[in-house]
Image: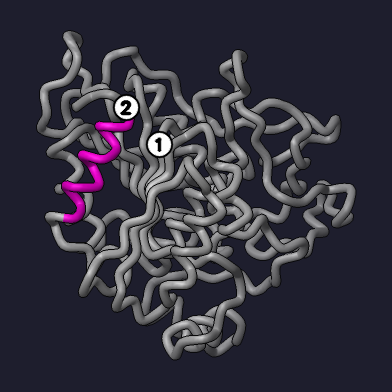
């Protein structure tokens, strides 16, 4: 997260809400710890909850690269999960109406932290993060970096990389990919406890990579061209409505497989299709092996990649898994 001159960890800006969640849809911009405005939508769901009327679980959906909260495939996912609890969808930086530029999985962890903090502030007892493709890697890193301390109820949260190591300062002299607001300094690594509200209670990662810079398939080679080349970023902006930052990662963020090993104590579900054209099956198997006993792996026959390929029955099954892990079924 962003740090000030004294090295204190910055917090996401969440406007306080009442302890009872709204009974209707609410849309607002959330301010991340590094100053990005994230477009977010809360939907109360269609399931009766606690005595207060607040569903006990809220699902925070993290979309894939080039998605946003208004895309049809993201709305379809949200509608499915709304039958099991409340739902928060949001657009990652550089996507949709959110400000900033995409860092393709690096600083997006701050976007998710803001969305989780807002979801929890609305009075829900449990928060489940569900990420697809790029979002699947983000939910892993978020869970690894925002962890409840045993017995304290606080999390240790930060990005991998420090202002001291990279030479970043108030003027934004940083080489980290995707600093959307360069006037903010780089976050300090594990410098102070994060907001306890920003940690997830369960994590679902769908169609996620296990390692960075993978180019073993044609779709991933095309994606690297779009991210790394100036002409590719123009295609991203005008064809896919995705604004991509031009900086390379330095330092490289915690890899998804490293993050999967640190998600505990939150339960982790890894879902992957056996016809995924982006990431072959060694990726989910590596993630599951890293998670150990805390993780569960579902390899889905006939499924392709991410939100567009996930059948509605699978989405409901994922929601029921999350509820069962929270003792709500």
- Whether residues under marks 2 and 1 lie with C-beta atoms below 8 angstroms apart, the answer is yes
Direction from residue 160 to residue 220 in the image, left or right: left
Instruction: State the residue at coordinates (56%, 53%).
Output: 290
Secondary structure of residue under mark 2? loop
Q: Earlier in the sequence, mark 2 or mark 1?
A: 1
Direction from residue 77 to residue 7 in the image, left or right: right
Direction from residue 142 to residue 77 in the image, left or right: left
Instruction: State the residue at coordinates (25%, 32%).
Output: 323
Magenta segment boundaries in residue numbering: 314-325
Whether 321 is among the magenta residues is: yes
Using the image, tell me which numbered label, if any, was put on residue 326: 2
Secondary structure of residue under mark 1? strand
Whether 83 is among the magenta residues is: no
Q: Is residue 63 visible?
A: no
Quadrant position of the N terminus in the picture: top right
Q: Nearer the viewer, residue 102 or 269?
A: 269
How is this picture coloured?
one colour
Residue 136 spot, x, y in % from top left: 43, 57
Residue 298 spot, x, y in % from top left: 31, 57
Q: Residues within 10 Å of mark 2 (few under 14, many from 20)?
A: some
Residue 181 spot, x, y in % from top left: 65, 54
Q: Residues within 10 Å of mark 1 (few under 14, many from 20)?
A: many
Task: Give the answer, above or below, for where 81 lies relative to 209.
Answer: above
Task: Give the answer, above or below, for where 165 lies relative to 327.
Answer: below
Residue under label 1: 202
Using the image, tell me which numbered label, if any, was put on residue 230: none
- Gap between marks 2 and 1 measured at Cα: 8 Å
Q: Nearer the viewer, residue 324 or 105?
A: 324
Q: Nearer the viewer, residue 125 or 293?
A: 293
């Amino acid at each position: 997260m962003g740090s000030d001159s004294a090295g204190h960890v910055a917090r996401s800006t969440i406007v306080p809400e009442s302890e009872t969640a709204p009974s209707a849809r609410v849309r607002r911009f959330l301010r991340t710890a590094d100053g990005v405005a994230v477009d977010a939508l809360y939907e109360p769901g269609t399931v009766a909850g606690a005595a207060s009327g607040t569903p006990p679980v809220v699902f925070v959906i993290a979309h894939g690269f080039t998605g946003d909260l208004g895309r049809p495939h993201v709305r379809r996912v949200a509608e499915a999960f709304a039958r099991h609890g409340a739902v928060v969808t949001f657009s990652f930086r550089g996507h949709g109406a959110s400000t900033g530029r995409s860092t393709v999985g690096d600083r997006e962890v701050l976007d998710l932290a803001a969305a989780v903090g807002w979801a929890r502030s609305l009075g829900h007892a449990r928060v489940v993060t569900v990420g697809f493709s790029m979002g699947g890697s983000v939910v892993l890193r978020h869970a690894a970096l925002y962890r409840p301390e045993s017995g304290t109820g606080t999390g240790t949260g930060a990005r991998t990389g420090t202002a001291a190591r990279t030479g970043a300062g108030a003027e934004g002299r940083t080489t980290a990919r995707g600093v959307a607001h360069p006037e903010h300094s780089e976050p300090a690594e594990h410098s102070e406890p994060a907001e306890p509200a920003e940690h997830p209670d369960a994590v679902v990662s769908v169609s996620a990579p296990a390692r960075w810079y993978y180019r073993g398939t044609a779709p991933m080679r095309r994606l690297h061209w779009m991210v790394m080349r100036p002409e590719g970023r123009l295609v991203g902006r005008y064809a896919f409505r995705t604004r991509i930052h031009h900086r390379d990662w330095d330092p490289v963020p915690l890899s998804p497989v490293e993050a999967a090993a640190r998600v505990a104590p939150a339960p982790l579900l890894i879902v992957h299709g056996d016809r995924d054209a982006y990431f072959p099956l060694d990726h989910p198997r590596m993630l599951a092996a890293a998670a150990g006993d805390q993780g569960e792996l579902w390899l889905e026959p006939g499924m392709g990649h991410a939100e567009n390929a996930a059948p509605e029955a699978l989405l409901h099954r994922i929601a029921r898994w999350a509820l069962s892990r929270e003792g709500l079924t």
